[in-house]
Amino acid sequence: MSQARFRFFGELNDFLAHDRKERSFTYEFDGKPSVKNMIEALGVPHPEVYAIQVNDRFVDFSYHGQQGDEIKVYPISYKQKIPQMAALQEKVEDEPRFVLDLHLGRLAAYLRMMGFDVLYRNNFEDPELARIASEQERILLTRDRRLLMRNSISQGYCLRSLDPERQLVEVLERYDLSDQVEPFRRCLRCNTPLVPVSKEKIVDRLEPLTKRYFNEFHICPNCKQIYWKGSHFQRMQRLIDRLLEDNH
C-alpha cells in the first residue's frame, strides 16, 4: 500500500469529508492510479479541478500517483495564481451553452430569461446528458457529482445550493457571466431565440386587456409562444436587476 499527501483548496473542500477539509491528509492507494481517479475517489469531480500540482510541478489528469507524492488540487477561483499553461479546464467560449439535468427546471428558465442557450428536458437520462455535453460542447450543470465524473464530460459544474435563485448566482459567478446577460431574447419554454411580430398577425390570440394596452410583441418561431412586456415581464426584470446587483 502506497501513500500520498493531498491538499484541496477553495471550493473543492465542499466535496470532502469533514476531517479532510482545509488541511493536508494522507491518502492510501494500491498500484499507480491516475491522479484523476484518486481525486474522484475522494469525491471531487474532475470538471471542478482547475490545476494539479505534484511535488511542486504542475501535471495533468493522466499523471500516475507514486509513493510519497505531495499533491495540491486547485479550483478555478485560484485561476489568477496558476500559470495559464497549467490549466486543465478549456476556456469557455464567449457565449457559453449549457445542458441541465432533470432536477433543474427552474434554473433552466432563469438562465433562458437571462438570454443564455440552455438545453433542458425533465426526462433526460444520465447517458444522454453526458453525450449531449460532449458532442455539443455544452457545460453540464447538475447536483449529481457522479454524473460529472463521467470521462466524456470536460466542462461542468456541481451546484451547491438547492434554491434556484442562488443556483443562478452560482452559475453567473462560476462562469463570470454578468456582462453577457441579454434578457428576454430566448423562449422560456423551448430555448429558441425570439423574433419580433406585429400585433396584427397575432391579435386573434390576445386577451382583451392585452390587445388594449400592449403593442410590442415577440414570438417564438418554434413553439409559437407570444411574449410582451406585461406584469410578468416587470417581475422578471426586477429579479434580474436584483440578482445582477448581488453578483457585483
Image (tube, grey):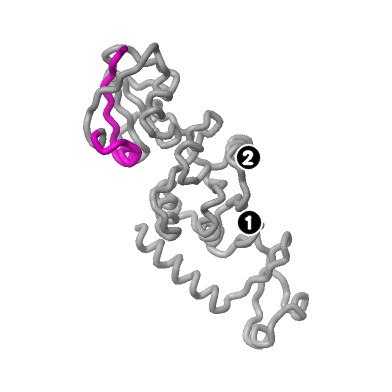
**Number of marks drawn:** 2
Please give left or right for residue 8 compared with residue 126 in the image. left
**Within the image, what quadrant is residue 84 found in?**
top left
Spatial CA span between label 1 and label 2: 18 Å
Q: Which of 103 and 230 is in front in this view?
A: 103
Instruction: Pick the quarter of the image with the N terminus.
Output: top left
Identify the element where label 1 is drawn. loop
Residue located at (56% from left, 31% from top)? 152
Instruction: Pick the quarter of the image with the C terminus.
Output: bottom left
Identify the element where label 2 is drawn. helix
Q: Position of residue 191 (x, y in %)?
A: 63, 56
Q: Which of 62 and 123 is in front in this view?
A: 123
Amino acid type of disc 1? Answer: Asn
Q: Where is residue 48 in the image (x, y as percent from the top left)?
A: 41, 37
Q: Mark 1 points at which residue?
A: 191
Please give left or right for residue 92 compared with residue 211 in the image. left
Q: In this view, does 143 lie above or below 154?
A: below
Amino acid type of disc 2? Answer: Glu
Q: Mark 2 points at which residue?
A: 128
The part of the chain drawn in magenta is 1-19
Please give left or right for residue 236 compared with residue 189 in the image. left
- Is residue 193 located in the magenta-colored stretch of the structure? no
**Of the image marks 1 and 2, the number of the one nearer the N terminus:** 2
Please give left or right for residue 124 compared with residue 80 in the image. right
**Within the image, what quadrant is residue 70 found in?**
top left
Classed neighbour count for the residue bearing mark 1: other residues with Cα under 10 Å, few (<14), some (14–19), many (≥20) = many
Residue located at (24% from left, 26% from top)? 25
Q: Position of residue 222 (x, y in %)?
A: 73, 59
Q: Position of residue 150 (x, y in %)?
A: 52, 32
Residue located at (37% from left, 38% from top)? 76
Classed neighbour count for the residue bearing mark 2: other residues with Cα under 10 Å, few (<14), some (14–19), many (≥20) = few
